[in-house]
Image: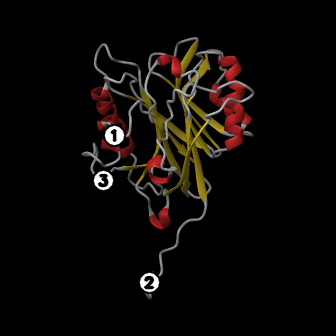
Amino acid sequence: MTAGWEPPPRLDTRLSVLSWNLWWRFGPWAARQPAIDATVCRLAPDVVCLQEAWETRDGESQAERIATALGGHHAAYAPAVGLDIAAESLGNAIVSRWPIRHTELRRLPAPDGLNELRVAMRADLDGPRGPIEVFVTHLNWRMDQSDVRQDQVRALAEFVAETAEGRSFPPVVCGDFNAEPASDEMRMLTGLAPVPVPRLVFLDAWRTAGDGGPGYTWSNANPFAVVDSEPDRRIDYVLVGYPRDQGAGEVVAARVEATHPVDGVQPSDHYAIYAELRY
């Protein structure tokens, strides 16, 4: 400590965020759902960002179910473009402890023949200490499609930048990016490579406040993941824009969750990432 200098005040209150790919209705999905519900309720996050969530044509919604399990939280769902007319659509969702004032959907680019109908969704949350903008997305999955994901990351960054003016809290961007931290697409978002939008950079919650381990969210220890014969990887993220006054948005804790079965059932083929931010 330098004599005569006092550090600026820091926010003590927290915002907890969970990002999780729920593996749609694949595998023993009816048995998995109670394990998903129990895991989310145990963590009790303020915000849950979901990928591969489902909704049926008759209005049954996995996000709404989770919101109800959490005690009356709010939910918004965005089907993949082109799947909104399916009997059981697949998409992204956000569940929030606080009211969701507005949502917007953005289609992500992909060349002909490689279009996996990927989208990004923004939700504006009416938080108790100021509004919060949360984005959720899911990028192309193939390991050889970094070039496609780079285009999708550029579109995502432009989407986030559209509402930058007047934003009082850093944007929170969550998702299954299907990309490892050293990939070009993730380096573009985290400032380790030229950023798609000037002055827009994100801090990786795990890199900032994880336990120093690999943080794998795709793991061969998971019986649902091992059948794909892919290497262990960290591909799921909570990303936060650069902190604001009093450390608003600073990541103070991060951990991998949903790693163990619940009543003998593994909840998903992905593990989840949980983070706590100053808010």
Of pointers 3 and 1, the one earlier in the residue sequence: 1
Q: Is residue 65 visible?
A: no
- State the image coordinates of residue 244 (x, y, percent, origin top left): 44, 61
Label 1, secondary structure: give it. loop
State the CA–CA distance, disc 3 to disc 1. Answer: 21 Å
Q: Name the quadrant of the N terminus.
A: bottom left
Name the N-terminal-most of marks 2 and 1: 2
Q: Nearer the viewer, residue 10 or 268?
A: 268
| N-term mark: 3 or 2 | 2
Q: Is residue 104 above or below residue 194?
A: above
Name the image quarter holding residue 82. Answer: top left
Q: Which residue is mark 1?
A: 182
Q: Amino acid at mark 1?
A: Ala
Q: Residue at 33%, 31% (x, y): give it.
A: 152
Query: Residue under circle 3?
Result: 199
Look at mark 2 in the image and give the residue it sits on.
Answer: 5
Q: Is residue 113 above or below residue 188?
A: above
Image location of residue 201, percent across then percent down: 35, 50
Q: Give the amino acid at mark 3.
A: Arg
**Which-is-in-front pick, marks 2 and 1?**
1
